Image (cartoon, helix red, strand yellow):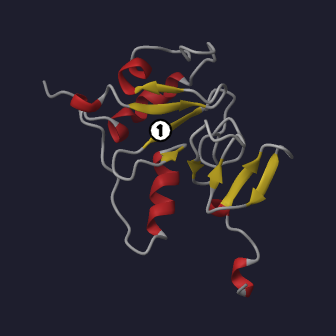
Amino acid sequence: MPADSAVPKPSERSMSAAAGRATPTNGGVASTGTDAAPHVFGAVLDLATRCIHFHSELDIVAIRFACCRRYYPCFQCHDEAVRLESVPHAARRWPKSEWSELAILCGACHRELSIAEYRRVERCLHCAAEFNPGCRLHAHLYFEESAG
């Protein structure tokens, strides 16, 4: 193993469900340890999908990006991670015609919501965990808004 790969960067950490702490694993993937929950990439701090950029008690949502179909806690985690790829790509917003896609992951129960469902609620439809209302300020970075 090369010497520089021995110490993981924040984007290469993930959560160990058994130990409940960050451990180096497969490229910055947070998982609940089950195959049922999607992996969350980026600078993830805990199993609730909080990251180094957004980590309040209510920051428990990860978003599957339309461009790469990977879950990230935030746009900054996505941008930082893809910048390191051999072929970086820009984030693409979800068009309104695709808002029925399951693209929101609740960090509390690890169940998915459609974009349309997420946009009309303040709590998870499955477990009633409260989402951060401030996330609406960044919606334009993830979802195409209708003109007019």
Name the side, left or right, on which 61 lies relative to 20. Answer: left
Residue 145 seen from this side: no
**Which residue is at a point 51% across and 61% down the rendered structure image?**
81
**Which residue is at a point 45% across and 47% down the rendered structure image?**
75
Image quarter of the N terminus:
bottom right
Check disc 1 and give the amino acid type. Answer: Ile
Say few, some or many: other residues with alpha carbon within 10 Å of mark 1 (under 14 / 14 to 19 / 20 or more): many
**Foreground: 116 or 134?**
116
**Foreground: 75 or 26?**
26
Q: For the residue labelled by badge 1, is the local secondary structure a helix, a strand or a loop?
A: strand
Residue 132 seen from this side: yes
Residue 140: horizontal and vertical position, in percent? 33, 36
Q: Residue furthest left?
A: 148
Name the side, left or right, on which 45 lies relative to 90. Answer: right
Image quarter of the C terminus:
top left
**Foreground: 106 or 37?**
37
**Foreground: 124 or 137?**
124
In the rendered image, which quarter is residue 101 located in?
A: top left
Residue 37: horizontal and vertical position, in percent? 61, 37
**Which residue is at a point 58% across and 46% down the rendered structure image?**
39
The residue wearing badge 1 is 63
